[in-house]
Image (cartoon, helix red, strand yellow):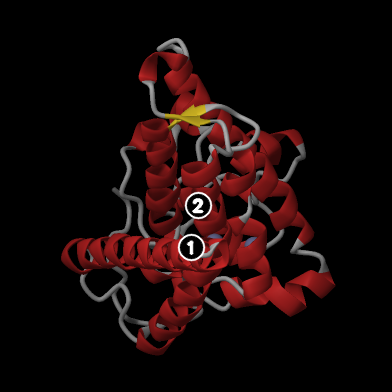
Amino acid sequence: MSPALAILLSALAMTAIVGTRYLAASGAFALATRIRHPGLYRGLDRQMRREIGWSLASAAIYGAPAGIVAWGWREHGWTRIYSDVSAWPLWYLPVSVLLYLAAHDAWFYWTHRWMHRPRPFRIAHAVHHASRPPTAWAAMAFHPLEAIAGAVVIPLLVFVIPIHVAALGLVLAIMTVMGVTNHMGWEIFPRWMHSGPLGSWLITASHHQRHHAEYACNYGLYFRFWDRLCGTDKGLGDFRSLRRGVHSAGRREPDLDA
Ligand SMILES: [Zn+2]
Ligand SMILES: [Zn+2]
């Protein structure tokens, strides 16, 4: 098989994996929403179809660099991904996961903040903010330009920071779950994760909801470090305030706190 065909097939396989992962994760949390807060997504069918369309397009974009790097890893030993668990000390396993999350978070914070400048917002980031309020399907609802900015992070990091293949799987799982739950419209995590000493450094739906409500704050992805350092952290949001503008007054709001 020619390298070009092998790369194409690898990219297609990665697209299928990312797309399936998105549908499974968002589908599962949308179902959890139906059970836990029936009616929360009432009247949002059109928006959710839109979110799924943009997200599947993003899956194709995420699949391309991931497919190229996966091919290079298999065929030419590219990247610093290792599969022999004794290649690095055991303590490095959790450290590598934290390094990836911190690096991804920094990249996300600064590109996200830049995308809130008027021109990039109008051209690209407005697609993500058209979800008002976001649902579990909005996890990958990005304009293709924004999807490219997100798609290159992990494929670049694997060339720089050594990581065991299972730890990389954990990073991708955390990325998927947080991407979905941060947009779900209610808090699924226990109180210590969003309030209290540790919660004041972690980002869950309570924090990202406020970004979707007020735009110019709470730009982070996993950690509140950059937001707090740069004075853009406005604290936790109120799930009801974002929904009030969308749904007719008088409808009883479900209890959205965990
Ligand atoms: Zn968002
Ligand atoms: Zn934004």
**Camera-side residue of 220 and 89:** 89
Splitting the image into 4 quarters, where does residue 229 fall? top right
Q: Is mark 1 within 8 Å of ligand 1?
A: no
Residue at image mark 1 = 6
Q: How many marks?
A: 2
Amino acid type at mark 1? Ala
Q: Residue at x 64, y 33 (%)?
A: 225
Query: Is the residue marked by circle 1 packed among few (<14), some (14-19), or many (20+) residues within 10 Å?
Result: some
Give above or below for 216 relative to 106: below
Percent of width and height locating residue 30: 28, 67
Tell which residue pokes out farthest to the bottom in this image.
46
Confirm or deny contact between disc 1 and disc 2 (CB under 8 A).
Answer: yes
Give, as a three-letter code, the residue at label 2.
Trp
Residue 206 lies left or right of residue 255; in this view the side is right
Disc 2 C-beta below 8 A from ligand 1: no
Q: Is residue 220 visible?
A: no
Image coordinates for residue 17, horizontal then vertical, percent: 36, 61
Q: Which residue is outermost to the left?
A: 35
Give the percent coordinates (x, y) of residue 42.
Answer: 30, 82
Q: Reading the chain from its start, which is encountered first: label 1 or label 2?
A: 1
Dot 2 corresponds to which residue? 71
